[in-house]
Image (cartoon, rainbow, N blue to C red):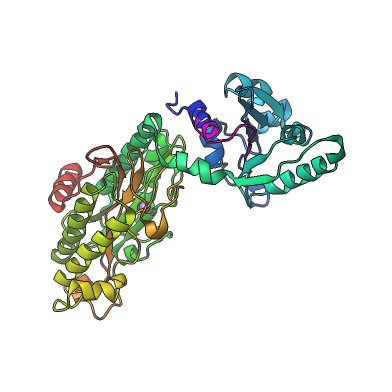
Amino acid sequence: MTGIDYQNHRAQLLNDMEVGDLAVIPAGDLVTRNNDVHYRFRQDSDFRHLTGFCEPGSLAVLAKEESGKDRFLLFVPPKDPAREIWDGPRAGVEGALAQFGADEAFELSAIDEQLPKLLENRQRVLYPLGAPIGERIERWRLQLGARVRMGIQAPGHYLDLRGILHEHRLRKNEGEMQVMRRAAQISAEAHRKAMVEGRPGSSENHLEGVIESYFRSEGAERIAYGSIVATGANGCVLHYINNNSRIEDGDMLLIDAGAEVEGYAADITTTWPANGRFGEAQRRIYEAVLDVQQDLVRRVRAGSSFQALNNEAVRQLTAAMQGLGLLDEKASVDDLIESEAYKTYYMHSIGHWLGRDVHDVGSYGPQRNRTFEPGMVLTIEPGIYIPPGDETAPPSLRGLAVRIEDDVLVTEDAPENLTADLPRTAEDIEAFMAQARA
Ligand code: GLY
Ligand code: MN
Ligand code: MN
């Protein structure tokens, strides 16, 4: 059973609403893939956060009432035995009440009748501004406006629900942390399995299968994002998606893959030699990135920020690039930072919030200077990528790509690395592969 406390998530939102407010939260819809085939349904992250309800097309409403008795309403697809033979069971109105904690539940067909009543005489409505539900809210508002002479008021203020809700999603509670630990653990084990199987002569597609089949066999719902399984210079393509090359002797693999468990993502990158031994140049670049990555993981503390960490990453990576012969060793680090010379080889940022969405919601603050607080989870993922055609780079480094990515929970004290269960030093990787492949 889930450790996710949806009732608590609703209480958090209601706590930030004013008496009289109404929040309208639409579910996701099925999306056509081709002809009459749909993509496998994934519930909208906000809707799931507040309801745990995973049927498409639904609608949730939270009403903060003067009486102090707040209301949670669910509008759900109706029970339909003929349809359920094809698509599987639906909770229906009864299930919405009994299993999902709704105070009131209705079939979807009741929305246009119930929502105008719910909107009557309210001051403020919270909903995801810009979402298609806005058109329906506008229609209901006009219906109410036509009854103004009868003393009925339509709401005058429309606020973006996300601004409030995403602050809650950013800070994980204990139940969410447990699920994220599980997602991280399954994902780390999948990377270890790939390290065992990723020999020269194997393929990116085989490793993609190894990883994603392990996710599913452990109960993960799906991949948290498209897996990147890149051998050799394919690792220089930051969002590589083809995953269909043969693995050659002497290649390094760069794999960025994470599972989604109960709606929460993990996001891990590992880099390792296919033949089990780092070449000399590979080892130098790997260790340079690892030194930076491990130092930055230790710096994930309350009060720090992405801005501070990225500045530190740029400083350390620039110095490392000088040591590797990628940037002018005689130039000052400050000058190289000023001219953004490092961007040839490190062109993304140090990380992002992680949660229900792999690039999770929540404000980053101006220039990403928002300070970290306990309960926030983020990635630390420095890398160095040397394009194969870069004639200014030492020949032995051309086409090498290293990224190392962990998921880190901010605590009151030392950071908790959720993905620590991986061999990370070059020695540990070689020893793990030698032993696991023996
Ligand atoms: N896997 C996407 C990222 O690392 O941001
Ligand atoms: Mn990431
Ligand atoms: Mn990643």
Between 214 and 418, the one nearer to me in the picture: 418
Whether residue 19 appears in magenta in the rendering, the answer is yes
Corner quadrant of residue 119: top right
In the rendered image, the quadrant that contains the N terminus is top left
Q: Residue at 63% of width from left, 34% of height from top?
A: 60
Residue 425 rendering spot, x and y as whole percentages = 16, 50
Residue 420 rendering spot, x and y as whole percentages = 24, 42
Q: How many marks?
A: 0
Between 323 and 308, the one nearer to me in the picture: 308
Residue 387 rendering spot, x and y as whole percentages = 30, 72
Position above or below: 244 against 90: below
Position above or below: 330 against 400: below
Whether residue 167 appears in magenta in the rendering, the answer is no
Position above or below: 347 against 293: below
The magenta span reads 12-25
**Residue 206 seen in the figure:** no
Residue at the bottom extreme, as displayed: 391
Between 6 and 403, the one nearer to me in the picture: 6
